[in-house]
Amino acid sequence: MALTAPPTTAGPSVPATLPRLARWPVGAVAAAVAAAHLAVAWIPGWWFDEALTLAIGRHHLDWGSVDQPPVAPLLAALTDLIAPGEVLVLRLPAIAATAAAVVLAALIARELGGDARAQTLTAIAQATGIWTAFTGHWLTPYTLEPVTWLLIGWLLVRWWRVRDDRLLLALGVAVGVAAQTKFQVILLGAVLLLSVAVLGPHALLRRPHLWVGVGLAAVIAAPTLVWQALNGWPQLRMAPIVAAEAADLYQGRTGVMIGLIASAGVVGVPLVLLGLWRLARDPALRELRYLALTAAVLYAAFSITIGRPYYLVGLYGLLAAVGAVGLQRRRETGHRRGRWVAWPAAALGAGAAGAMLAVSVPAAAPAVGEQVTQATTRAYDALPPERRVHTGVMAESYIYAAILDVQAPEGTLPPAMSSNRSYGWFPPPGDDVDSVLYVGSTADELRPWFAEVRPVGEAGSPTDPGAQVWLATGRLAPWDAVWPSLRHLDVQ
């Protein structure tokens, strides 16, 4: 049965009927995604950003931190409270979000008039994205972000179809929650509004509910924005850091520009490109052209500023839905050439996604963390008891600090410190801490502030063979004076 859209409120050229939701095929794709990620989620080990998320949740939960809002750390804290140290339980919210994104992408295709084939193809495209396959089981802000962006996209497309202004209130809530999850949604929202102002539908801007929704988004996002303001807006200072890291991580701007497209996956890339073409050229989608402009502006912005190649992942499902419905329209008008390509491509995409999922296992292998943790624990245990109670543990990078925080057995080490990134903005040590065990390739940042800094152990790993454990003694100034001068955002 097809459901008819309200004829007196729907916008022009919207689908006349709403196709039945392809529950079984879409549900099967979402279930397969969840099962695949569950199959590797139980394997011990920590992706470094996941370790940071858990460390913040355990020891430093607040309305914000340097490079992420509080939603992911809050979820980490709750799962850790339910099942302390259980990596599978920690990852369940991420897997649920990854599977839900598959369903939301299919729902967008349905709103556009997509039949069961189009919905299923869209679900497969969302499920087999390269970045999604790699990170979809790790509890990080960028794993939770796609489902929030797709919810925003579904609300916008549904409003276009039914003109129910209550959806704009829900849109504001979705944007606010997304802003408490990852900051890029603020840029998304701004570009969406500007794109609507340029291309329409201008009726959207005249809806009071839209501006009430904007107010709701601002209220929900306010706590983490206030935290940023009170701490000097460190997030705004991350852009040049991200750009500098791109040279080593992604081969610079060219790698980022390719990655922003290629991360959509074997099925996703052609559907995304077709979706952009349809939004720009199809008269039936004239009122949704602002979505293509939004994607183009964001692509240009992230390319120019050299962002991360996964910054557009939240838009892939929306654009793929437009592309999949475009293929449906060709099929309905009798175009048969190339019809056979879609499903072999889906199989190839699933294989590529499976390979990325397999790569994620060694990427989060516990070996490096165990090496660092064991070396630090040995050095800490070797200290005389009277020295140990006044000695803190510090790391050169937030990566080592987070690993020490989540991987060291409970009670063996004090909470880790670092001057790097989020850790640098946590409260400084108390003045009873007059010595520091330091993990890193060099302890030069401590030398001006301690009378003696000497190596006491090796903590090298294949990724950082020069890492050592250092002991700094004889603190020369109060921590309140030392700590602000040590803070830095780059990973040395």
Image (cartoon, rainbow, N blue to C red):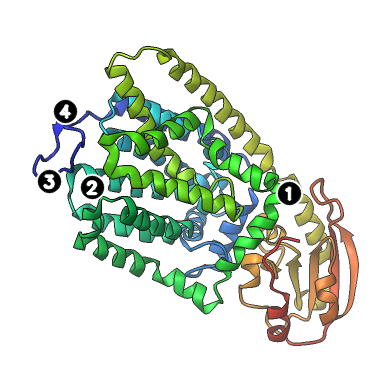
Mark closer to the chain start, 3 or 2: 3
Spatial separation of the CA atoms under disc 3 and disc 2: 10 Å
**Residue 324, image x, y percentages:** 37, 28
Q: Quadrant of the C terminus?
A: bottom right
Numbered mark located on residue 9 in the image: 3
Numbered mark located on residue 2 in the image: 4
Choose between 39 and 53: the one closer to the eye. Answer: 53
Horizontal side, residue 288 vs residue 139: left or right: left
Q: Secondary structure at mark 4?
A: loop
Front of the two marks 1 and 3: 3
Mark closer to the chain start, 3 or 4: 4
Q: Amino acid at mark 3?
A: Thr
Residue at the (39%, 66%) spot, across then down: 221
**Residue 176, image x, y percentages:** 37, 61
Q: Amino acid at mark 2?
A: Trp
Spatial separation of the CA atoms under disc 1 and disc 3: 52 Å
Spatial separation of the CA atoms under disc 1 and disc 4: 52 Å
Q: Amino acid at mark 1?
A: Asp
| Residue at the limit of the structure toward the left, as seen here | 8
Residue labelled with disc 1: 248
Mark closer to the chain start, 1 or 4: 4
Numbered mark located on residue 159 in the image: 2
Spatial separation of the CA atoms under disc 2 and disc 1: 43 Å
Q: Residues within 10 Å of mark 2 (few under 14, many from 20)?
A: many
Whether residue 184 is visible here, answered yes or no, is yes
In the rendered image of this protein, does residue 430 appear above or below residue 395?
Answer: below
Discs 1, 4 touching: Cβ within 8 Å: no
